[in-house]
Amino acid sequence: MKFLFELLSKQSVSGDESDMAQYIFDYVQKRAFSWKVQPEVFFGEDFHDCVLLKFGTPTTAVFAHIDTIGFMARYQNQLIPVGGPEIIEGTRLVGKDRKGEISCKIVGGEDGCFHDFPRGIDRGTRLSFEQNIRVDEDYIQAAYLDNRLGVYNALKLCESLENGWVVFSTYEEHGGGSMPFLLSFIQNKAPVRQALISDITWITEGVEHHKGVVVSIRDKFIPRRRFIDRLVALAEESGVPFQLEVEAFGGSDGREVQFSPYLIDWCFIGAAEDEVHTPNEKVSLFDLDCMLKMYRFLMEKL
Amino acid sequence: MKFLFELLSKQSVSGDESDMAQYIFDYVQKRAFSWKVQPEVFFGEDFHDCVLLKFGTPTTAVFAHIDTIGFMARYQNQLIPVGGPEIIEGTRLVGKDRKGEISCKIVGGEDGCFHDFPRGIDRGTRLSFEQNIRVDEDYIQAAYLDNRLGVYNALKLCESLENGWVVFSTYEEHGGGSMPFLLSFIQNKAPVRQALISDITWITEGVEHHKGVVVSIRDKFIPRRRFIDRLVALAEESGVPFQLEVEAFGGSDGREVQFSPYLIDWCFIGAAEDEVHTPNEKVSLFDLDCMLKMYRFLMEKL
Amino acid sequence: MKFLFELLSKQSVSGDESDMAQYIFDYVQKRAFSWKVQPEVFFGEDFHDCVLLKFGTPTTAVFAHIDTIGFMARYQNQLIPVGGPEIIEGTRLVGKDRKGEISCKIVGGEDGCFHDFPRGIDRGTRLSFEQNIRVDEDYIQAAYLDNRLGVYNALKLCESLENGWVVFSTYEEHGGGSMPFLLSFIQNKAPVRQALISDITWITEGVEHHKGVVVSIRDKFIPRRRFIDRLVALAEESGVPFQLEVEAFGGSDGREVQFSPYLIDWCFIGAAEDEVHTPNEKVSLFDLDCMLKMYRFLMEKL
C-alpha cells in the first residue's frame, strides 16, 4: 500500500507527466532485479514522458496512462479544464508556478470556472485536486485513482511477467497523442497482436462495486467480437470474478489502438469507480484485487 | 439477383464481420476462375475481418465496407446503437446469443431504447434489422442496402477488372478503424494514387431516384478539386448517367483516406437511397446499374 | 508589402489550393538565389498541393497552411461552408465556374445560407470573400489574413534560414489531412524533433493588439509543458515582445503533429487578429513584425 500511496501523491496533469515518468523509471530501476524477468527499458527524451518495458517475447501489450485530469490557469482568475474534471464549487486545487506553491478553491461552475487564490497565477499553470486518501476495509477513496490504480496494476504485473510489453502512456485524459508513437515503436521493435487497457471505468446500473474486475465489451468504441469472445472464455476459465460492461460513451487508450494502422485486438479491463473525475473517486479493494489477478492470468494465457 | 439476395441475408454488425468476410472469401474462391484476371487474395487472421483483392498492377483502389449498423444489448432490456440506426418503435430485430436465436421488437425511441424479448439477452449481443427484401421493376427495398450494394458492385467489378485493388473494409458505420491498416498494407504492397468509395448515399433535394449514380463532390469531408474535376470529365465521357452531390454532413471510408499519411485522391461514387439506416432502404435499380457501369468505365480509364 | 498584397489577392479555399501552391513554388524559384541558404524544394503531383523546403540540417519544422475558409455552391442557390466562415448577410463573395466569373452576396444566415447570383452556380463551386485590403500606420485589415500572414512569415524566414523545414500545408481550415503525409515525408527525409505552427490566432480578453506575437500554451490541444517552458525561456531571451495564450478551443496544424506517430514537440506562434474568419480580419503591424523577428530568433536557437 505504501507504494500505491506514493503513486497517488504525485501530480501529473496531461502534458506535464515528466515527474511521473521519472518516478516510474526510478521504481523500475530499483525493483526490476527482484522480478521474474528483467525487462528492456525505454525512457528519456526520445520517448517524451512515456516509459516502455519489454519482457521476453511479447504477443500482448498492457497500456496504463500516467496522466490525470486537472485545470489550467487562463487569464485573470479563470480556470479551464484539462480533460473532463467535475467542476464542483469549493473543491480544493493545488499546483505550483514561478512564484511558488498554490492552494486554492474552485469558484463558479460549468459555465465559468475561477480560482480564489489571492494572487494571480501564471498563465498556463496546471492545477489538480488536492489529494486525500481514505482506505477502509472495503474501499479506497482518493483523487487520481483513474489511472493510478491502472499504473499500480501494470507495475505489480511486472513482478511475474514473462512475455509482454508494459507501457505507460501520456495525454489519455485530453484526447491522446502518445499512443500512435508508442504503437509504432512497439510494432517495429517486437510486435504484438493484442492489447489490454489497464484503466479504471465507471460504476453504472450494470456495473457494481465488489462484483469483480470489469471486462468491457464496448465503450464509445467497439473491440472486435472474435477477440472479446476469446477473452471472456479465458476470464471464465480464470475463476477470477469479473463483470461485463456495455457502454455507449467513454473512451480509453483503446480508441487509439482501434484507429492505428496496425491490426491489434484490444480490450479495456479494469476496476470500476464512482464519483468519477472528482477528488473522491472510490474503488472496491476486492475489485482491484480481481484486476491484479485477472491481468496475471490473462498475460500468461493470451 | 440470387447472389445479391444472399449478400442481403447475412448479418454483419460493425465489429462482428467475420462471417461476412468468410462469405466473400468463399465467393471469390468459387468465382475467380471465370474472371478476366485472377486476383491475389489477402484474407485470414492477419487481416482481421477484411478481405483484399489485388488485380494486375493497381493505380486505383475500390473500397466497400462490409459492416452494417445495428444495436447491442446493454443491461436489463436496454439497447444501445452500433453506428447510427434509425430508432423506430416496433421495428423488428434479430440476432443470436449463447441461449439461442433472438427475434424481438424495438420499444421506446431516441431517448431510451429497449427490446421486448421475453428473456434477458446476453450483454454485448448484436442485433440488427430483420431482413425483408422487396423488388419491383424500379426499386429494390431492404435492410442493409448500405452497403451490400457497394459490396455487390465491387464483386461485379471483379469480373472484368484488369488492374486495381478491390478492398472490403470493416467498422465503417462505427467510426472506422480498419482503413488505416488497409491503406498501409496496400501502399506497401502495390501503392495507388486514387481511391473510389463504393458505398450508398442519400436521396436529398438535389439527388433523386432514377437520375444515375452519384459522384460526390463532398460530404462532411472534401476531396481534392483537381481529382474531382478529372473524375467528372471522365464521367461525362462515359455516357453513364450520373448526379453530382454536395453535402455538408455524412462520411465514408473516404474520410480515412483523407486523414491517412498517404496522398491518395479519393471520391465517393454510389447509388442513392432513401429511408436511410432503416429496414426499408430503397434504391433505384437504374441507379444501381449506372453504378456498376460507371465503376467499370472509371477503373479502366483512371 | 507588394508581395503580401499579391499573397492576399489569391483564392485558395480548402481542397483547391493548387494555384496558391504554384504561386509559392514560382516565388521560391525566383527568390531563393538571394537567400542565405538554397533549400531543397519538394513540389508537384507527388505532393498534391503542398510545398516543402528543406534548409541545411533541420531540427525544427515550420508549418504554414495555404488554404482559407470559404463556401461551396450546393443545390439551387444554397451555400454550405468550407471550414468555419462567419456568415453575415450581405457579405460579398467571388469565385468562378464553367460559365464564368461569379460575384454575389450572402443572403440568410447560420440557419440557411444562400447566394443572390442571378444565374445558377455549378454544384461544388468554391466561393470566398471578396478581397479588400486596408493598411494604416497600425493595422492591416483584409480577408485571408488567416493564414496569408503565416505564409508571409514563413517565406520571409526563408531569407536567412540556415537549418530547418519550411512547409506549406493544405486543408487546415477543413479538418486537415495533408499533415499526416507531410510529417511522414519529413521524418523519413530529414527528421525533426520540434515544430512551430506559423498561423494567426484570436484577440481575446487576454490577448491584445500591439502587445507582441502570441506564443500559445494551449488551444483545444495542449503541447508538452517541457517544450513550452523551454520556448518561453527563449522568447524571453529574444527581447521580442510576446504574449502567452491559454485557450480551451480552436485548433491548428499542431493538432495533427500531436496525434501523429512521431514524438515531435509543437507550439503555435503567431500574431492575433480580430473579426476572425470575416472579410475584415485585422492584425497589428507591430505584432506581425514581432512574429517575423521571433521566428528568426527561435529557428536559430532551437
Image (tube, coloured by chain):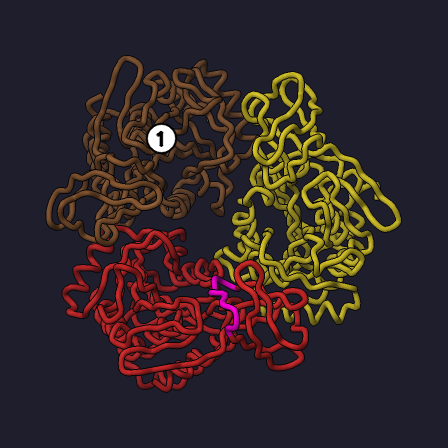
Chain colours: A yellow, B red, C brown
Quadrant location of the N terminus of chain A in the rendered image: top right
Amino acid beneath label 1: Val
Horizontal and vertical percent position of residue A146: 69, 45
**Residue C166 appears in the figure:** yes
Furthest-right residue in this view: A137
Horizontal and vertical percent position of residue C290: 38, 18
Residue that label 1 marks: C276
Q: Within the magenta stretch, is there residue B220?
A: no
Please, which chain is the residue tagged with disc 1 on? C
Q: Within the magenta stretch, is there residue B84?
A: yes
Query: Looking at the picture, does residue A260 appear above or below residue A66?
Result: below
- Residue range of the region highlighted in magenta in the rendering: B82-91
Q: Residue at x 62, y 76 (%)?
A: B117
Quadrant location of the C terminus of chain A in the rendered image: bottom right
Foreground: A180 or A99? A99
Q: Judging from the image, what secondary structure is the residue with disc 1 in?
A: loop
Relative to A243, is B26 on the left or the right? left
Foreground: C277 or A20? C277
| Residue A246 image-quadrant placement | bottom right
Query: Looking at the picture, does residue A162 appear above or below residue B89?
Result: above
